[in-house]
Image (spheres, coloured by chain):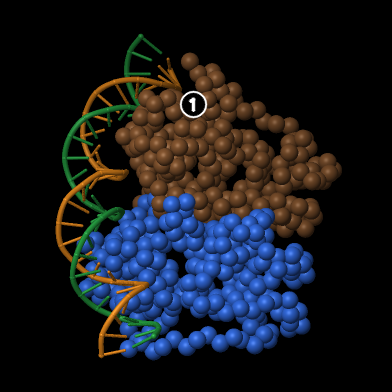
Chain colours: A blue, B brown, C orange, D green
Amino acid sequence: MSAPIPRKTMPRLDESLLTPMPPFSRLEKRQIREILDLASVRRFDEGVAVFEEGAPAERFYMLLDGYIRVMRITPTGEQVIALHIPSGQLFGIAQALGRTTYPATSVTASEAIVLGWPMRLWDQFVAQYDGFASETYKTVGQRIGEMNTRIVEMATQQVEQRVANSLLRLINQTGRKVENGIEIDFPITRQDLSEMTATTLHTVSRLLSAWEKQGVVASRRKRITVTDPHRLVLICRGEAPPSR
Amino acid sequence: MSAPIPRKTMPRLDESLLTPMPPFSRLEKRQIREILDLASVRRFDEGVAVFEEGAPAERFYMLLDGYIRVMRITPTGEQVIALHIPSGQLFGIAQALGRTTYPATSVTASEAIVLGWPMRLWDQFVAQYDGFASETYKTVGQRIGEMNTRIVEMATQQVEQRVANSLLRLINQTGRKVENGIEIDFPITRQDLSEMTATTLHTVSRLLSAWEKQGVVASRRKRITVTDPHRLVLICRGEAPPSR
DNA sequence: CGCGAAGTTTGCGCCAGAGCAAAAAACCAC
DNA sequence: GTGGTTTTTTGCTCTGGCGCAAACTTCGCG
């Protein structure tokens, strides 16, 4: 049986919270305490929207613990997952890119602890704290790179390669070492994976089954462990024979 | 017969060049002259790379005239067009996002006139010229939005809708009013369009033929004119019967 | 422990659109 | 004009993976 996942506890707001986070890492303790004094902290259950696409961008956030899923919903109700945000990153920073509304919906992919500040403090932080802006834009640059890669993948790769790619990205960003391999550190369904790779939950299920037979992954309900990452790399390069 | 397209002439470097361009629009003439003094200007033929993916990001650019196509090339040699940049925008601004190499290749989609500065001036411009940074990041924000939309489209729409969408985007961004409709303002092949929509030139050709029969578009070699934009909107919403 | 809900697996038929091939048309340089 | 190259069109075949349906498994909860 799986060990029950302990409920995330509300952290005390002290400066050790933010010190490891890149946008704040160069600051003095005193400055971090100032920033914390202005923040609100909240715990979210899994699957809850922190903010929704189109809503006025009134706050920006930092993810202290857990995972955030950035998604868009089409007029016909289909969901597309754009990316996952690991803890330690800012999100909802629409303001920094000159937007007045959020361009996508942010949903917790696991339980999560989130700090939030009113958007009007953004310019203040940028002006006041050295490196804050540049570190943030570095993150933005990374996300652009990821999106670009996504586009190229979707344009040129087969479903099997796309799913393999997504799995690898997930274990790189959010992988946790476990007994028999590396497990994705938050609950994820076949449906989720299909929304990340532009396919259907049926096809994802078939692929995972096939891979499981080959010993590449092990999975249970809402959990996926990659047991043979190297093999998965071959698959996503198209260097392994198709698994169906 | 098509009127021969006049060769773009090398502009004189005076401040009227940059005044209409957003990142510089709030500056005084004196400041703009400073900026121009530091720039090099070059004319590119159609289909020439301004910089290539992976190369060290040594310069950043502004497109004065013409169109730039941002693309990536996969290990297997397939090309994917990420977006088109219209004149008046900065590009190759990897530095601003904390990157030391260019994340994609920029190729001229038409003849083009391009200003370039050494990257070390970037921080100087940001520090020295008010609004320069924020206007730039606004552009970045727009491009992120576009990429996001692209991802959603590719994930949820049929080929016909994607191509229709791309055409609409092109005539919005780069359309030129002509006698019988709106023409895309630079030479574009079926192949190009297929690389923008993750399909094949064959499928694009079939679609354009069908649309031409219905009076939605008119096309000749490397030129596409949309004669019935409203109809095209219906098609990309999936509200018109499939054209095949 | 038993029930219902949520998530997963699997089978089967079908079709959008890719892949291949070949011809036609448009354009260019000389 | 002529010859050669690039781009476009069109026909045909074949298949990856979607859509639908139904059974099965796992989990949470009273």
Residue B164 in the figure: left or right of residue B170: left
Q: Position of residue A120 (x, y in %)?
A: 74, 65
Above or below residue B211? Residue A182 is below
Q: Given the image, what chain letter belongs to the residue carrying mark 1? A: B
Assess disc 1: are there few (<14), some (14-19) or many (≥20) residues with their C-alpha within 10 Å of its C-alpha.
many
Q: Position of residue B224 (x, y in %)?
A: 47, 29
Task: Identify the image quadrant of residue B179.
Answer: top right
Q: Position of residue B122 (x, y in %)?
A: 70, 55
Say which residue appears at 79% left-offset and 43% top-offset: B32
Say which residue appears at 43% left-offset and 68% top-offset: A169
In which quadrant will I find the C terminus of chain B?
top left
Above or below residue A21? Residue B52 is above
Q: Position of residue B38 (x, y in %)?
A: 75, 46
* A134 vs B59, nearest the viewer: A134
Which three-letter amino acid code belongs to the residue tagged 1? Answer: Thr
* B215 vs B48, nearest the viewer: B215
Task: Identify the image quadrant of residue A177.
Answer: bottom left
Say which residue appears at 77% left-offset and 67% top-offset: A124
* A15 vs A115, nearest the viewer: A115
Determine which residue is flagged by label 1: B227
Residue A99 in the figure: left or right of residue A204: right
